[in-house]
Amino acid sequence: MSTQDYSLTLDLGDASLTLPVLPERLTVSAAGRSRVLEVLELGEVLALRPPGLCTLSWESFFPRDASPCTGGLPPALSPQRAVQALVLAWKEAKPVEVRLTGANLGVNGPFGIEEFTYEERWGAPGDLWYAITLRQWVDCSPRRLALDGLGTGADGTLTAWEQAGDRTGEPARPGSYTVVKGDCLWTIAKRFYGSGESWRTLYEANRAVVGANPNLIYPGQVLTIP
């Protein structure tokens, strides 16, 4: 397979960078997360866990001029602009979309720039050599979903859409409450109004049921909750 069958493109949000010179080696790795545990009467056992996030790393250079490495074509971006685009995405913590064609390494998708170094070497003025390490990125930003905002997608799966906005006003209260053993107006007011200090409001609405002494209520009495 010729090198023309391969291409490696990094989508940086505002810019798209196709590497003018493909790296000699593209390294894909993932840290193991399995653990060795000591179990009584069994000794050491291996607790298997899936690997960590994938990393993708390589070394290459951005040429200033056309060369056999670039297929005889001048690079679309100057070395300075290519480096600036990568540094900007790195500093702004933007995810980088990796698109590798010509090989099935399972690395296409979003990554974050973890390490990036570059230098100019003697004998090749204007060219910039670089080394880069990307780590797989997973979008974990919070999303608010409305439980009543459920529907069915085109494939028949259950879907949800974002909640339109926050609800305003106080939660609805029941119109009545039946007293149980251990209740007092203070605890009932705290339950429904959020503060026991509101017991007077509860008492005034139920004076006919409670009687002259607000400290005496009995199980089975039905109180109005205004």
Image: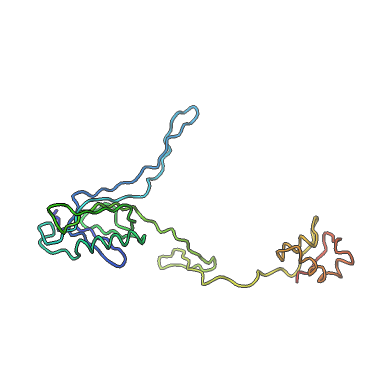
Residue farthest along the right direction in this orientation: 212
From the viewer's perspective, tell me whether residue 82 is left or right of residue 49: left
Q: Is residue 121 above or below residue 179?
A: above
From the viewer's perspective, tell me whether residue 49 is left or right of residue 114: right
From the viewer's perspective, tell me whether residue 41 is left or right of residue 138: right
Q: Is residue 154 above or below residue 33?
A: below
Q: Is residue 28 above or below residue 4?
A: above
Q: Closer to the camera, 92 or 224?
A: 92
Q: Closer to the camera, 26 or 147?
A: 26
Q: Position of residue 178 (x, y in %)?
A: 78, 63
Q: Residue at x 79, y 65 (%)?
A: 199
Q: Quadrant of the C terminus?
A: bottom right
Q: Position of residue 165 (x, y in %)?
A: 53, 71
Q: Position of residue 171 (x, y in %)?
A: 65, 69
Q: Position of residue 29 (x, y in %)?
A: 30, 46
Quadrant of the image occupied by residue 21: bottom left
Q: Residue at x 39, y 56 (%)?
A: 138
From the viewer's perspective, tell me whether residue 188 is left or right of residue 129: right
Numbered marks: total: 0
Specify the color scheme: rainbow
